[in-house]
Every structure is written in C-alpha cells, then in structure tokens.
Amino acid sequence: MVLDPDEEFRARLAAALGARAYVVEEGEDGRAILTSTGPVAVLIVEILMPEQDGLEAIRSARARWPSVKVIATTAGRAALSADYLLGLAAHLGADVTLTKDTPLATFLAALARLMAAKL
C-alpha cells in the first residue's frame, strides 16, 4: 500500500511496483487503511498527510495487520525536518525510513529486502 498526498509521487511509485508484479493499493492519507481490502504486507507512507498523517497511519496499520512492514518517507517542511519526522516514524516501528528524494532504485531495494525477510 502506498499512502502519499502527492499524486505524482504516489503514481510513479505504484507504477514501478506494479511493473514488478506487486499488487498496489493507493491512498492520499491514512484513511485508506480503513477501506483497504488487505491484508497489506508493506506500507509505504508519507509522514505529512492531510486528515490522518503518516504516524497515525503506521499505528492504524500495525493494529490492523500486526506483521505489516513499514517504509516511512517524507520531504519534511520548514518547521519539521525530514530527519526529525523519520526519527518519529522509526520510534513508532517503521522498518525503513527514506527521504522523498531517495532514488527509486533505493525504494525498490528496501522493499525487496523487507519482502525477503517476510519469507
């Protein structure tokens, strides 16, 4: 599942995952977890989202799917640095934290490692 309010980023990531035979659900914020057809193996989540932010989404996903793996991402904002936000995500149990400017190949490699660890 890819949760990100940035439609372009979300679509690019979902397309890359779909091209590698991953089944991808998408949403613009954490509310998508409530309507997911699940189960979800990996959640890729932006920390700064409207309505239900990424930190709430991580908690919701873990409550619904205890074994879900989490890749948290953000670009941060002026008052909230990416490092600070990703640190919070790691504290909440994100398995991997990446800034939004991380190359797509790095996202895909992180996902592959998480999927291999689930086997």
Image (cartoon, rainbow, N blue to C red):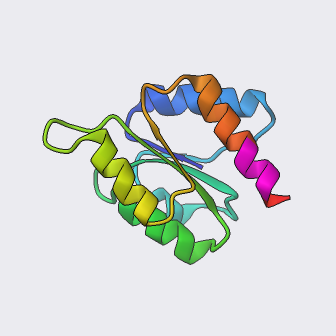
Give the vertical position of 22 relative to 90 (above or below). Answer: above
Which residue does the image show at 45% across and 58% down from the upper left?
A: 90
Which residue does the image show at 54% across and 29% down from the upper left?
A: 11
Residue 100 horizontal/vertical position (percent) = 42, 31
Q: Is residue 4 left or right of residue 119?
A: left
Name the magenta segment's main secondary structure. helix
Is residue 55 among what the camera can see?
yes
Residue 75 horizontal/vertical position (percent) = 33, 34
Residue 57 horizontal/vertical position (percent) = 43, 62
Give the vertical position of 110 relative to 105 (above or below). Answer: below
Q: Quadrant of residue 24?
A: top right
Magenta residues span: 113-117
Question: Is 10 in front, or is 104?
Answer: 104
Question: Is 72 in front, or is 49?
Answer: 72
Which residue does the image show at 63% across and 71% down from the upper left?
A: 65
Q: Quadrant of the C terminus?
A: bottom right
